[in-house]
Image (tube, rainbow, N blue to C red):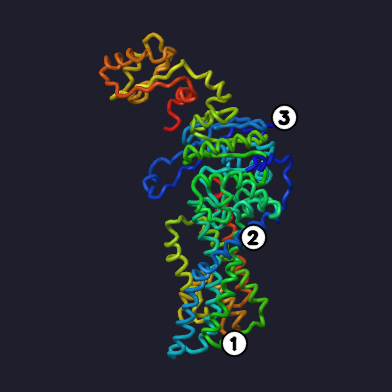
């Protein structure tokens, strides 16, 4: 218990690079994510996995759907896992942070521009989204059995879809996380996220909606459509799908729009 | 020499709150918002222990918020260690440590990680941060909780964790916002000792409080602010010397004190009289001698005296004379 431990103030502030601060912020989020991994995976991947059990295993066994359906289902399931994990990883803690605990304040006091704290949150959300999709892939494959037409030959394209899809949903998470109040989180999931999953071309390919043109064009406002279709284009190109360049362009556009609005909102919430 | 903190004409207007269910508000006149600061000029010298004293809503937290770049000023200048806050916020963050009003530890991390990661945000490598964190935890008395979840800490321990966090990157200026609110008397005394020690090492400390005694005990100079304005600024002794007319006698009546106040002001030995609702305040150099006369005056005006309080000249009486209200009101 020596009194000298509370050192005298330094006379010069050692400069620290922005990249080093950013890296420390990211390490913090990785540490916390690792600690909460089981709960996080359950929250974000249980629903897609259960869907795989019913639609990818039970229904084909019963003969209600053909084995070929799995080729359309698998990419959609990966898209849901990726998108939900990215959106939740960013939005959920942020809602609580800004509305109640202000825990994020120690990061807002870090010597780095405020908007970069938000960018770090986006990057951390992207990592968690991609991790969730990678986690679900082998499980889904195991439950479904062999999937006709599944190829990893276009892994660069898969990666591009995964990264851009995760970016779109991570920035959407930032937007929702700064806009939604804690008492409305449940409402957000039932009114925004749930319809997004059901009308996200996740459990059926977009071209399948040719039969219902009104729905086919209405779902184009849904960002999840592009992730699911991008996954189909790169993982099971035999299934009818949107052209990959269109998918990638839309994901870039959505990321830019969600990101621009989300960063503004973050700045407004961070500073009174 | 440049001040540790300088503000010039600092002004903050919060936009009108959009309360949930405020449907009728839209139809009413557009609210002008809340003016939290109205042209605040302050200068704190390096190494000072400076107190911002005022009741809730005086603008203390807003002032600290602007200086620590968590609140955007509507107008005016604010400099910390010579650095303009709005122009170079990152430079300012490097120089300051902040202890918030309510402890907000990072609950995703355990106690020691809170310190190590905060150090990492300031570029201090783990090897250098660990002994420093250890030292701070020992000195502040929660080293045994290093691996605990932050929820396992008591309120006082959480507050000390916030102080350790604010110190781990060796800031030049330490801001504390109502640091002892919610602490029991023993924890408060302990915190005071720590703050004195930090100050003795030459650190600049800026603290807000609405406890008169706390400001009096710790601060070299005190700024009294209320409703966003600076009302007085001096050493505690200097402020006490300007407290008006000796003793403050406060009578609580059973109804409006206006008529009684008028009559009381005609009494000999009365410096100043003030009526606030049912409360009659009289400043007098004659101590308690005036009490019988005041009771008689009140009763002659048809009022019953329900309570009488006496206060010696103090920061408290000065504050009441400046603002018309008590600190804890």
Q: Is residue B288 above or below residue B230?
A: above
Q: Secondary structure at mark 3?
A: loop
Q: Tell me the distance, in whole angstroms, between the alpha carbons under discs 3 and 2.
A: 40 Å
Structural crowding at the residue carrying mark 3, measured as other residues with C-alpha within 10 Å and reported as few (<14), some (14–19) or many (≥20): few
Instruction: Pinpoint residue A122: horizontal percent, then vertical percent.
Output: 60, 61
Question: Which residue is label 2 attached to?
Answer: A27
Numbered label attached to residue A149: 1
Mark sitting on residue A209: none
Q: In the rendered image, is residue A254 in sight?
A: no
Q: Quadrant of residue A125?
A: bottom right
Q: Residue at x 34, y 26 (%)?
A: B277
Whichever of labels 2 and 1 marks the residue nearer the N terminus, that label is: 2
Residue B297: percent from left, percent from top: 30, 14
In the rendered image, the vertical position of residue A63 relative to residue A233, given as above or below: below
Please, which residue is most extreme toward the top here?
A: B268
Instruction: Pinpoint the chain carrying mark 3.
Output: B
Of all chains, the one bearing label 1 is A
Q: Is residue B181 above or below residue A212?
A: above
Chain of the residue on which disc 2 is drawn: A
Query: For residue B1, which numbered disc appears in the image?
Result: 3
Residue shown at the point (46%, 75%) measured from the top left = A215
Quadrant placement of the N terminus of chain B: top right
Which is more foreground, mark 3 or mark 2?
2
């Amino acid at each position: 218990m020596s009194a000298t431990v509370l050192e005298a103030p330094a006379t010069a502030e050692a400069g620290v690079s922005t990249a080093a601060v950013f890296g420390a912020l990211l390490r913090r989020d990785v540490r916390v994510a690792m600690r909460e991994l089981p709960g996080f995976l359950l929250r974000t991947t249980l629903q897609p996995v259960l869907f795989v059990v019913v639609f990818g295993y039970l229904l084909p066994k019963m003969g209600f759907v053909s084995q070929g359906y799995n080729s359309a289902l698998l990419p959609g399931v990966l898209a849901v896992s990726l998108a939900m994990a990215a959106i939740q990883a960013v939005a959920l803690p942020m809602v609580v942070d800004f509305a109640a605990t202000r825990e994020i304040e120690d990061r807002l006091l870090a010597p780095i521009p405020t908007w970069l704290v938000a960018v770090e949150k986006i990057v951390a959300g992207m990592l968690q989204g991609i991790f969730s999709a990678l986690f679900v892939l082998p499980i889904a494959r195991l439950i479904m059995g062999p999937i006709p037409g599944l190829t990893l030959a276009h892994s660069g394209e898969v990666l591009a879809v995964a990264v851009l899809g995760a970016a779109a949903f991570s920035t959407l998470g930032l937007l929702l996380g700064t806009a939604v109040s804690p008492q409305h989180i449940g409402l957000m999931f039932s009114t925004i996220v749930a319809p997004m999953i059901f009308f996200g071309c996740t459990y059926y390919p977009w071209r399948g909606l040719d039969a219902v043109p009104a729905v086919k064009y209405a779902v184009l406002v849904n960002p999840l459509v592009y992730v699911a279709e991008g996954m189909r284009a790169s993982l099971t190109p035999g299934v009818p799908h949107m052209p990959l360049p269109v998918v990638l362009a839309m994901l870039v556009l959505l990321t830019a729009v969600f990101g621009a609005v989300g960063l503004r909102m973050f700045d407004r919430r961070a500073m009174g | 020499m440049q001040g540790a903190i300088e503000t010039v004409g600092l002004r903050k207007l919060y936009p009108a709150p959009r309360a949930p269910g405020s449907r009728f508000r839209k139809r009413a006149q557009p609210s002008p918002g809340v003016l939290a600061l109205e042209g605040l000029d302050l200068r704190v010298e390096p190494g000072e222990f400076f107190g911002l004293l005022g009741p809730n809503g005086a603008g203390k937290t807003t002032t600290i918020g602007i200086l620590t770049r968590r609140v955007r000023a509507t107008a005016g200048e604010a400099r910390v260690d010579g650095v303009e806050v709005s122009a170079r916020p990152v430079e300012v963050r490097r120089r300051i440590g902040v202890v918030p009003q309510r402890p907000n530890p990072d609950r995703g991390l355990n106690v020691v990680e809170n310190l190590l990661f905060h150090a990492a945000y300031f570029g201090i490598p783990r090897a250098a941060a660990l002994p420093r964190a250890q030292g701070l935890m020992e000195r502040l008395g929660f080293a045994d909780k290093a691996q605990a979840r932050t929820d396992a800490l008591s309120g006082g321990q959480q507050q000390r964790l916030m102080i350790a966090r604010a110190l781990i990157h060796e800031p030049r200026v330490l801001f504390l916002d109502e640091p002892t609110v919610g602490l029991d008397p023993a924890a408060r005394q302990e915190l005071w000792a720590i703050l004195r020690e930090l100050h003795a090492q030459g650190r600049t400390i800026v603290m807000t409080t609405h406890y008169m005694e706390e400001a009096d005990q710790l601060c070299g100079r005190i700024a009294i602010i209320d409703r966003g304005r600076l009302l007085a600024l001096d050493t505690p002794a200097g402020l006490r010397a300007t407290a008006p007319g000796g003793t403050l006698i406060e009578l609580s009546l059973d109804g409006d004190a206006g008529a009684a106040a008028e009559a009381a002001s005609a009494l000999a030995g009365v410096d100043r009289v003030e009526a606030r609702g049912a409360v009659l305040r009289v400043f007098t150099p004659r101590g308690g001698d005036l009490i019988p006369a005041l009771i008689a005056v009140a009763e002659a005006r048809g009022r019953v005296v329900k309570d009488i309080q006496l206060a010696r000249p103090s920061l408290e009486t000065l504050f009441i004379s400046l603002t018309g209200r008590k600190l804890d009101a």
